[in-house]
Image (cartoon, helix red, strand yellow):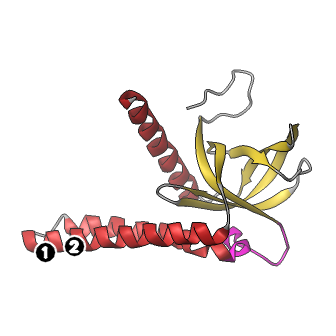
């Protein structure tokens, strides 16, 4: 986890992680944010599958028959493997490369080959391996600074739904926990 400097206006914690990042210039007729990224739609559907998986888990708690419970568990494992296979395939097709990103509930920063102008409004797709959690949202460019032959872009998320905010915070806590466990193992 990266600590936020005391003079920094951001009020949330930040993590350093990796993501597939894609952006698009806003057009008035396209909304929601995921409509800008037709090639990444399978990632958008993952959150719906995860919600169904949570419901299945809740129902499974009531199953008394051990064989039926084991069958449901095996089917869920198969679905997760198929989802991961699809995500890997989609990642390869997209041509996007995994890159470092600094992430908070309010925004993110990363290196880009493209320069942005302060206050540019963009559609943003972030996909975080290995679980392929995805976030499709709109963002405003807070800052874009030259960093050698690249640009350090700082974005502020716009219009996150409460569901997106909760999923993002959950992802960040899980990533932080995995990072701490990995640090204890090395």
Q: Which residues are magenta?
A: 25-38
Q: CA distance from mark 1 to mark 2?
A: 6 Å
Question: What residue is at 72 percent from the left and 61 percent from the top?
Answer: 22
Percent x, y of residue 62: 16, 67
Give the residue number, with chain letter if any, for mark 2.
72
**CB atoms of marks 1 and 2 within 8 Å:** yes
Residue 111: name its quadrant: top right
Camera-side residue: 146 or 176?
146
Residue 66 seen in the figure: yes
**Residue 160 vs residue 181: left or right?**
right
- Tell me the element at label 2: helix
Percent x, y of residue 119: 88, 50
In this view, which residue lies farthest toward the top? 6
The reply to whether the magenta stretch includes residue 108 is no
The reply to whether the magenta stretch includes residue 28 is yes
Residue 144 to residue 121: above or below: above
- Tell me the element at label 1: helix
Q: What quarter of the picture does the C terminus occupy?
A: top left
How busy is the neighbourhood of tag 2: few (under 14 within 10 Å), some, or many (20 plus)?
Answer: some
Number of marks in the rendered image: 2
Percent x, y of residue 74: 23, 70
Could you say which disc has been placed on residue 97 in the image?
A: none
**Residue 147 vs residue 45: left or right?**
right
Q: What quarter of the picture does the N terminus occupy?
A: top right
Question: What residue is at 51 percent from the left and 60 percent from the top?
Answer: 132
Give the residue number, with chain letter if any, for mark 1.
68
Question: What residue is at 83 percent from the left and 67 percent from the top?
Answer: 26
């Amino acid at each position: 986890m990266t600590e936020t400097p005391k003079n920094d206006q951001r009020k949330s914690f930040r993590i350093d992680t990796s993501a597939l990042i894609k952006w698009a210039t806003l057009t008035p007729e396209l909304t929601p944010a995921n409509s800008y990224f037709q090639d990444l739609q399978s990632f958008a559907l993952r959150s719906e599958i995860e919600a169904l998986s949570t419901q299945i888990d809740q129902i499974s708690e009531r199953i008394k028959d051990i064989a039926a419970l084991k069958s449901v568990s095996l089917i869920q494992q198969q679905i997760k493997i198929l989802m991961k296979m699809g995500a890997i395939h989609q990642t390869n097709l997209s041509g996007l490369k995994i890159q470092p990103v600094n992430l908070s509930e309010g925004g993110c920063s990363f290196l880009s080959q493209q320069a942005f102008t302060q206050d540019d409004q963009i559609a943003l797709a972030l996909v975080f391996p290995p679980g392929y959690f995805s976030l499709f949202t709109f963002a405003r460019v807070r800052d874009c600074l030259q960093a050698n032959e690249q640009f350090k872009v700082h974005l502020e998320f716009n219009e996150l739904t409460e569901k997106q905010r909760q999923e993002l915070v959950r992802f960040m806590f899980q990533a932080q926990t995995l990072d701490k466990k990995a640090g204890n193992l090395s």
